[in-house]
Image (cartoon, rainbow, N blue to C red):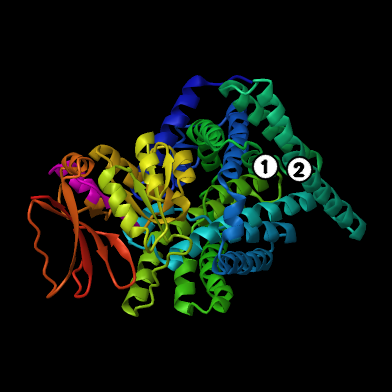
Amino acid sequence: MELSILNLLLVLLAAWLSGQLFNKMGYPSVLGELMAGIILGPPLLGLLQGSEALAILAEVGVLLMMLYIGMEIDPKELRKASLGGFLAAIGGFVVPFFLGYWVVTYFGGTGIAGVFVGMAMGVTSLATKSRILVDLKILDTRIAHVMMAGALIADTISLIIFAGIISFAAAGSLDIVGILIIAGEVLLYFAVAWFLGLKVFPPFYKWLKKKELTGRTFNITLVLLIALLFAELAHVAGLHGILGAFIAGLFLREAIAERKLSHELTGLVKDVSLGFLAPIFFVTAGFQVSFEVFQTDLVLLISVILLATVGKIIGTALFYAPSRNGWREGITIGAGMNGRGAVEIVIAGIGLQAGIIDQQIFSILVFMAIITTATVPIFLKWGVEWLNKRNELVRSTIGKEGYLFVGAGPVARIAAKIIAERHKVRMIDTNESNCKSAKELGINAFNGDAIEDVDLKDAGIEDAGNVISFTLNPEVNVLVTKKVQEDYLIPNLNVLMLSNNKGLTKQIEKMNANILFGKPVDLYNWNQRVINNEFEIEEIELQNNQLMFDDNTLPLVVKGKKSNFVFTNNYQPKNGDKIVLLKIKD
């Protein structure tokens, strides 16, 4: 077995270019990688070819990708998921599952193939992540929160059910005794995994830390060894290794108590898997697609795509009904959850390798994943417009009521103190002295870097619905704002501008963020005036909806009837509001 470096280079180049292209269009890179395999590989042009060496790299890539997914999922988020998210996930899985089983068996397929296709149809991936949510300006809506929770729950459930399917398929025909034996093996595996993950690894890691055996290279090697151990244990139990790698990721997140280290290791696994090995799997998966399905099984292909779409949307809406949030909202959520992504393709590929499904069914599942994912932006846009027209698009701040100030300078502390009269406020700053001064005012302040995920989480970003970028560096303000919008789906963003920079202003407008104080401000000068006590605070009540401020006045905070919030360019004047001003002393 010899690895062709040129072929590997071309596969990775094709994966990278196509992935970037699809990302630009608002779709997950996995779809671009699949299309590269289909178009450039044996199905069409034949410019790329598979090999045994590539297959091995692809298999390792899938294991590492599932390890990464496990390390990214926070079990606490699963526990915090809303009832609506749980109902949407279950309905969006169960209905397509039974429809998939029915359509395959109706067309003469085996029962196990029907079960497998049903499970693949039930998988949910919020394929467009935050991109479509940002474009439609629905980050702060109830449907966005339900979709995110539903996708998280559905992927976890799908992998557990997948474990059972693989076990049954490997055993062939089963009697009651055989079923009980397999069930026992699966339960034993989860028990052993739980014991190792929660009872053995945490104290073992603490012991290694005491022995100073926790360097960067040592840690990543240890993570990979544990992932391979869990994968092999899963294999011994008759399950597939991807489930073992996924569970290893879940437990490793909990075992490594240091959040910064855990985040760093997760990033390393992500870079190796999604940046190098996993794309090989998705490109070579495209090699297995057959266009013959359009001639031999066109009716089945169309039926699977239609039933997967209708089943996901209607199933989600039906099961979501007990939440009493309306059937139209349920349909819109179902449309947003209609995409299938990496997990579905991985499951289909394993099914093909295991002989559970043939190449035709595999091709149908790949085309189903591509087409259903392509519908998400279109259907979701229609659904949001539908709800908007009926005034049924509910803005929600579930668990997102707090304010996070990025920057704890003198002016920021005054604003934070006023807002804290009605809301939960936190601050993060790299300057330890600023944090100390904030704490003296009774404000929870964290000394850290807002560019770092681990510091953001420690500062309370996951509870924030409003982020106020208040540093003296305009580039940092824009960078942090973009990060919290894309990675944490923060709906209300406020950015300080220090000068009329057209480039930064354009980026702020693209993010739909607000500009603090309504205009560029010399924050350094105002901070110095606060430090030197050359200012005074004045509170005025708004009358006749008129706002007039001179250069010696800084409108800082609005005290509305129900909440306090920072003054921005998007503030809509309302009679009775009170504006807190900073004024230069005469």
Q: Residue at x 12, y 50 (%)?
A: 585
Q: Residues within 10 Å of mark 2 (few under 14, many from 20)?
A: many
Lower position in the chain sequence, tag 2 or tag 1: 2
Badge 1 is on which residue?
251
- Residue 464 vs residue 584: left or right? right
Q: Is residue 570 at all visible to an observer of this figure?
A: no
Whether 244 is drawn above or below 385: the answer is above
Q: Residues within 10 Å of mark 1 (few under 14, many from 20)?
A: many
Q: How many marks?
A: 2
Whether 95 is drawn above or below 556: the answer is below
Q: Are marks 2 and 1 in contact (CB under 8 Å)?
A: yes
How far across and down, in percent of the image, does residue 41 sit?
48, 37
* Residue closest to the eye, 204 or 152: 204
Residue kind at label 1, given as amino acid type: Phe
Residue 164 lies in the magenta stretch:
no
How far across and down, in percent of the image, does residue 488 sit?
43, 50
* 3D distance between C-alphas at marks 2 and 1: 9 Å
**Which residues make up the magenta segment?**
492-508
Badge 2 is on which residue?
193
Residue 498 lies in the magenta stretch:
yes
Q: Quadrant of residue 133?
A: bottom left
